[in-house]
Image (cartoon, rainbow, N blue to C red):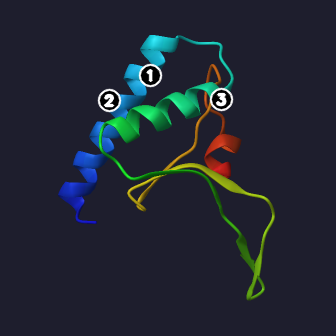
């Protein structure tokens, strides 16, 4: 995905996320925000997948550890939903 196209996609994703958060407000479970954002992105014409398996590579082997990508948009942008007051370093590490 080219840099300009990537920026347009991510800008539209951010707009959708802000719309969802403004409509729902704070305090809900991450799953509620995930489903609403998934729906909003689909209605905006994006190709979106939910809960995509993501194995890890360890010593040349692929290991399914149960990791999942919350939302994968256009096979290019990973969205990790967080419903917290403030992001911590562990949240970045999870992504």
Marked residue nearer the N-terminal end (1 or 3): 1
Residue lying at the far left in this picture: please name it.
4
Counting other residues with Cα less than 10 Å from the Cα at mark 3, is it few (<14), some (14-19), or many (20 or more)? some
Q: Is mark 3 on a helix, strand or loop?
A: helix
Above or below 56: residue 38: above
Above or below 95: residue 21: above
Q: Residue 59 carries which label?
A: none
Image quarter for residue 11? top left
| Residue at which label 2 appears | 15
Marked residue nearer the N-terminal end (1 or 2): 2
Above or below 26: residue 37: below
Q: Which mark is residue 20?
A: 1
Counting other residues with Cα less than 10 Å from the Cα at mark 2, is it few (<14), some (14-19), or many (20 or more)? few
Rendered location of residue 28, percent (x, y): 65, 17
Q: Residue 48 vs residue 52: left or right?
A: left
Rendered location of residue 47, percent (x, y): 39, 53
Rendered location of residue 81, percent (x, y): 58, 36
Distance between mark 1 and mark 3 Cα atoms: 12 Å
Distance between mark 1 and mark 2 Cα atoms: 9 Å
Above or below 2: residue 45: above
| Residue at which label 3 appears | 30
Image quarter for residue 12? top left
Q: Nearer the viewer, residue 86 or 34?
A: 34
Q: Residue shown at 41%/60% (left/top)?
A: 76
Distance between mark 2 and mark 3 Cα atoms: 18 Å
Quadrant in the picture for the N terminus: bottom left
Q: Nearer the viewer, residue 28 or 39?
A: 39
Q: Residue 54 vs residue 24: left or right?
A: right
Q: What element carries label 1?
A: helix
Rendered location of residue 93, percent (x, y): 66, 51
């Amino acid at each position: 995905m080219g840099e300009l196209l990537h920026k347009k996609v991510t800008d539209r994703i951010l707009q959708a996320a802000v719309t969802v958060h403004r409509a729902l407000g704070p305090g809900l479970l991450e799953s509620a925000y995930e489903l609403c954002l998934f729906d909003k992105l689909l209605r905006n014409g994006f190709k979106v997948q939910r809960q995509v398996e993501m194995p890890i590579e360890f010593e040349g082997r692929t290991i399914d550890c149960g990791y999942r990508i919350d939302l994968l948009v256009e096979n290019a942008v990973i969205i990790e939903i967080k419903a917290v007051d403030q992001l911590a370093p562990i949240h970045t590490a999870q992504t």
